[in-house]
Amino acid sequence: MRTMQDRPAILYFGNDWFAENRTSSHHVASWLARGYRVYYVECPGLRAPKATGRDLTKIWTKLCKFLRGFRPVGDNLKVRTLLQLPLHRFALVRWLNRVLVRATLRWDTWREGVRSPITWFLVPHLAAVMGTLGERLAVYYCIDDYSALPDVHAEAVRAMDEECTRKADVVFVASETLLEGKTRLNARTFVSPHGVDVDHFATSQDCRLPAPADVADLPRPIVGFFGLIERWIDLDLVDWLAEQRPG
């Protein structure tokens, strides 16, 4: 019988593990950790930071986490924060990031005893790292048109996204709209649509659980929205739904 140590480890590159918006990135990593050792690598964002208190605080927090190395957050799951300069429009910065990230990951995998891992990329800005870590298989899980996100350098991000797509052994996309463009670059592209955390949301039907105070007195049925309020959300649709259900 094969033990956990006999199976390949997975280096999983995603967004912040403790982010406010839990996404498919976190769910897939948690699911993989049921059968594999997962090393979840938190990657800096795609957009350049601004001189705001919020962004400066995030930079300081990431630096402190980077110095801590891998830290366990669950069974078979460890998290590590990468240090990168999020100025992807500059070629020199991209080169410095490649050198820093490769050195960091090679040191980390040596310390953790990781050999011939599977690499799983949710973000495109580590495209240059793909194929340099002695991996047996590289997966690119693309959930969005990253170059269209606000405040990113579209040309640089698009180039990294296409590089990731070409180099990956297998590509998963979250929607049919992403499939055609990715298939032109990599024939081994498949649609893997987002799912739902059934166990989590099913608790709303458990009559033994008290309703939260802020919704306890609202008339039923309650129609809710779960997710981030961002500029790309169709807020006109949410407004229309509210008009259709004024209660």
Image (cartoon, helix red, strand yellow):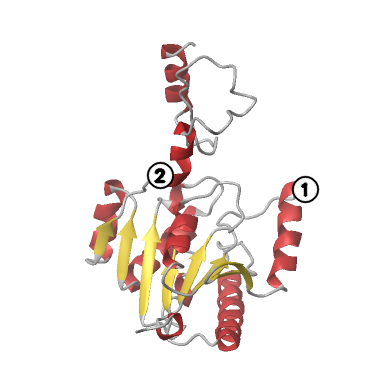
Q: Amino acid at mark 2?
A: Val
Q: Specify the quadrant of the image occupied by residue 105.
A: bottom right
Q: Where in the figure is residue 73, as x and y percent of width and height?
A: 61, 65
Q: Is residue 122 visible?
A: no
Position of 14 with respect to 55 (left or right) is left
Disc 2 designates what residue? 198
Q: Are marks 1 and 2 in contact (CB under 8 Å)?
A: no
Q: Residues within 10 Å of mark 1 (few under 14, many from 20)?
A: few
Compare residues 189 and 111 and report the one nearer the observer.
111
Q: Where in the figure is residue 160, as x and y percent of width and height?
A: 44, 65
Residue 53: numbered disc: 1
Disc nearer the start of the sequence (1/2): 1
Compare residues 174 and 114 and report the one nearer the observer.
114
Q: Residue at x 58, y 57 (%)?
A: 45
Tell me the CA gap for discs 1 and 2.
37 Å
Looking at this rendering, what residue extends furthest in the front direction?
Answer: 208
Q: Residue at x 44, y 67 (%)?
A: 34
Q: Secondary structure at mark 1?
A: helix
